[in-house]
Amino acid sequence: MILTDAQINQYRADGYLLIPDVFQGEALDQLCAARDRIIARPDRAWNFLETEGGPVRAYNACHWDEPTFADLVVAPECLQPAQQILGGDVYLHQFKMNPKAPFGGSSGWGWHQDYVNWRDFDGMPENRALNVAVLLDDATEVNGPLYLIPGSQHEDALGQDRANKTPGLTATEVGDDDVRRLAEAAGIVSATAKAGAVLIFDPMIVHASAPNISPWTRHTVYLTYNHVDNALTQPTRPEHIAARDATPLTPRATA
């Protein structure tokens, strides 16, 4: 999937790009089948739980044991936009599928900037990465969609609160005063869309999500691509969260 100049300019200005109906029909069915195979294994070694014995908060590295997700890593719909925006060869820094448990069973994610965590915990030298989120279920206003503050990626790393935070969760959060200032200037958008949509967003954009109050679980796959010249220098987290292999990826051929 090749982005237009207008789409790239929108991404540069707003810090995100939401593209509907990227995966449809059989392609989406295959991704959802892979989702179901992963969630049938709540005891996977790389899963991260909300609380001990609680629901899964993140299915980390599910491309390692699910071929459909491994194929998604090199899908042109995901990889080519990353190569365009980042201007060259990229590798996969992180792959995870985040569920939002129904009836508030997931705690949500506080306001944060992803790159700050990658810099501080993984030794990522610069913000030369991006996130590609693939919606496997509809994201609606009642099931905890991602919220973003447009243009906030142009900020420096904001004052972060590390108190009682655990690497692997939202280890750093943006303070209330900064969130209020940015939101009053640019507003807050919710990334609501049908299953199969793709959301591309800058790791410095201030974003968050609320609990899912609906009766249905919602799943989103997140692929984080990093430029090969920006590989990690001093990673402190395990490889299923912070990849060491910076081999350039090549988009798979389309039929």
Image (spheres, helix red, strand yellow):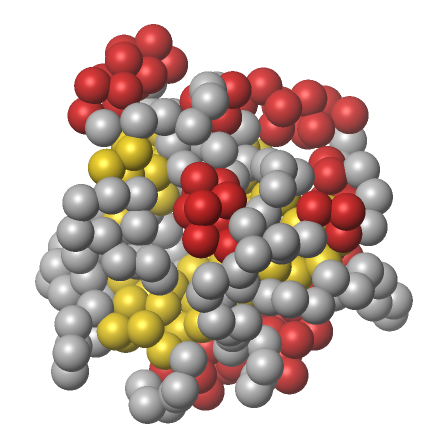
Q: Nearer the viewer, residue 177 or 122?
A: 122
Residue 100 versus residue 15 in the image, above or below: below
Q: In which image quadrant can residue 95 be found?
A: bottom right
Is any part of residue 134 visible from this angle? no
Q: In which image quadrant can residue 74 be found?
A: bottom right
Q: Nearer the viewer, residue 78 or 89?
A: 89
**Is 135 situated left or right of 224 in this image?**
left
**Is 145 situated left or right of 83 in this image?**
left
Q: Nearer the viewer, residue 236 or 240?
A: 236
Q: Residue at x 51, y 77 (%)?
A: 62
Is any part of residue 229 visible from this angle? yes
Q: How many marks?
A: 0
Q: Residue at x 41, y 37 (%)?
A: 113
In the displayed orientation, state which residue is furthest to the front.
Answer: 234
Residue 30 versus residue 182 in the image, above or below: below
Q: Residue at x 32, y 90 (%)?
A: 43
**Is 12 situated left or right of 240 in this image?**
right
Question: Measured from the top left, where is residue 162 in percent x and y?
Answer: 24, 43
Q: Nearer the viewer, residue 32 or 157?
A: 157
Question: Measured from the top left, where is residue 184 in percent x and y?
Answer: 27, 11
**Is 105 situated left or right of 41 in this image?**
left
The quarter in which the C terminus is drawn is: bottom right
Question: Measured from the top left, where is residue 147 in percent x and y?
Answer: 34, 37
In the displayed orientation, state which residue is furthest to the top.
Answer: 185
Question: Measured from the top left, where is residue 117 in percent x and y?
Answer: 42, 47
Q: Residue at x 73, y 39 (%)?
A: 86
